[in-house]
């Protein structure tokens, strides 16, 4: 199959998997908190990966160096998602979903300078549009009119997660999956993330038990994890067999899915400036794929 075609399909898988997962994660984080949502959703995602491993029987061969890098990725993955879900817990889903796309700027720059992948002329203005869009979405305009600058709730946490994802997790993940089996890398990453969250909860003496005995809530959290795993697996596969510089921008268009679902099902409202910012973010992401 054509390498570019694999990259596009993988990016679309990430876009829809993550887009729906993020919409559901916002609801779950508000109900049980970001730590519990991430912990139990990752277990659900890990179960999916185990089933895939059983049926595909990939090679488990991995060097100590790559294993160390994968574990590091797992730690970065955990911290990035905890911050991201914290943004959902306290912030506006549309704002948080648009802001997380800033990670694609880091991914493209690193792919270009360190990975030697091609950067097209249209991707440069695309990154500028993306940056402007994120600023319009995340800055509190009421404070800006008064001469001060402040970020909306959840933006600070989301910006921190974009740095972790864009600089540490995805570039390293692409490097690793080019040298070993992508499914095993995903398994180790998720297992590491689960352990990290468990240790953090023990250190902070916080319980990870979901007190509410509600099957709908359990199904919601499981759906978050399974869909997120589909997004990760799709993008990881694309990085392994395609070009990350194409996969990442398409997958980052998840904002279209998340915001669209929020407007339809939760009737979430955004002001005109934020709407314009989200539009610029989406246009910028689409342009980065060309």
Image (spheres, rainbow, N blue to C red):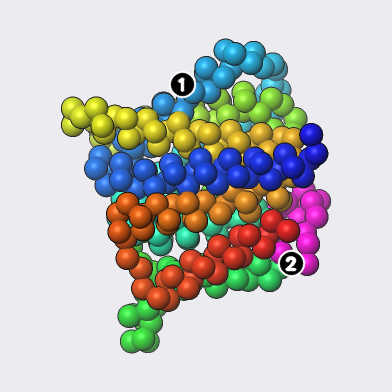
Q: Position of residue 232 (x, y in %)?
A: 56, 37
Picture residue at 57% right of the left edge, 52% below the top: 252
Is residue 133 visible in the rendered structure shown here? yes
Q: Earlier in the sequence, mark 2 or mark 1?
A: 1
Q: Position of residue 132 (x, y in %)?
A: 55, 73
Cβ–Cβ below 8 Å for labels 2 and 1?
no
Answer above or below: position of 170 versus 201.
Answer: below
Question: Is 118 left or right of 249, judged from the image as shown?
Answer: right
Looking at the image, which is closer to me, 206 or 97? 97
**Mark 2 → mark 1, Cα distance in angstroms:** 40 Å
**Quadrant in which residue 285 is drawn:** bottom right
Residue sitting at the far bottom: 146
Q: Residues within 10 Å of mark 2 (few under 14, many from 20)?
A: few
**Quadrant in which residue 288 is drawn:** bottom right
Picture residue at 35% right of the left edge, 68% below the top: 270
Q: Which residue is mark 2?
A: 122
Q: Which residue is mark 1?
A: 47
**Range drawn in magenta:** 109-123
Q: Position of residue 186 (x, y in %)?
A: 58, 29
């Amino acid at each position: 199959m054509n390498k570019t075609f694999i990259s596009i399909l993988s990016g679309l898988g990430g876009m829809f998997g993550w887009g729906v997962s993020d919409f559901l994660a916002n609801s779950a984080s508000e109900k049980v908190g970001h730590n519990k949502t991430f912990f139990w959703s990752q277990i659900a995602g890990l179960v999916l990966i185990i089933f895939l491993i059983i049926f595909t029987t990939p090679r488990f061969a991995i060097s100590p160096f790559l294993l160390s890098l994968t574990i590091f990725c797992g730690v970065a993955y955990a911290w990035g998602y905890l911050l991201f879900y914290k943004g959902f817990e306290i912030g506006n889903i549309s704002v948080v979903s648009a802001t997380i796309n800033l990670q694609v700027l880091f991914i493209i720059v690193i792919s270009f300078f360190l990975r030697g992948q091609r950067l097209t002329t249209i991707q440069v203005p695309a990154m500028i549009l993306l940056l402007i869009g994120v600023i319009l979405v995340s800055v509190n305009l009421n404070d800006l009119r008064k001469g001060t600058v402040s970020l909306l709730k959840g933006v600070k946490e989301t910006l921190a997660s974009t740095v972790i994802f864009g600089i540490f997790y995805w570039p390293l993940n692409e490097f690793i999956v080019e040298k070993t089996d992508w499914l095993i890398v995903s398994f180790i990453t998720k297992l590491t993330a689960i352990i990290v969250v468990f240790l953090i909860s023990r250190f902070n003496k916080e319980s990870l038990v979901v007190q509410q005995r509600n099957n709908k809530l359990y199904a919601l959290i499981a759906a978050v994890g399974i869909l997120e795993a589909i997004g990760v697996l799709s993008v990881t596969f694309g990085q392994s067999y395609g070009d990350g510089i194409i996969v990442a921008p398409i997958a980052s268009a998840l904002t279209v899915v998340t915001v669209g679902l929020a407007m339809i099902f939760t009737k979430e409202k955004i002001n005109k400036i934020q709407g314009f910012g989200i539009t610029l973010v989406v246009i910028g992401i689409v342009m980065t794929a060309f």
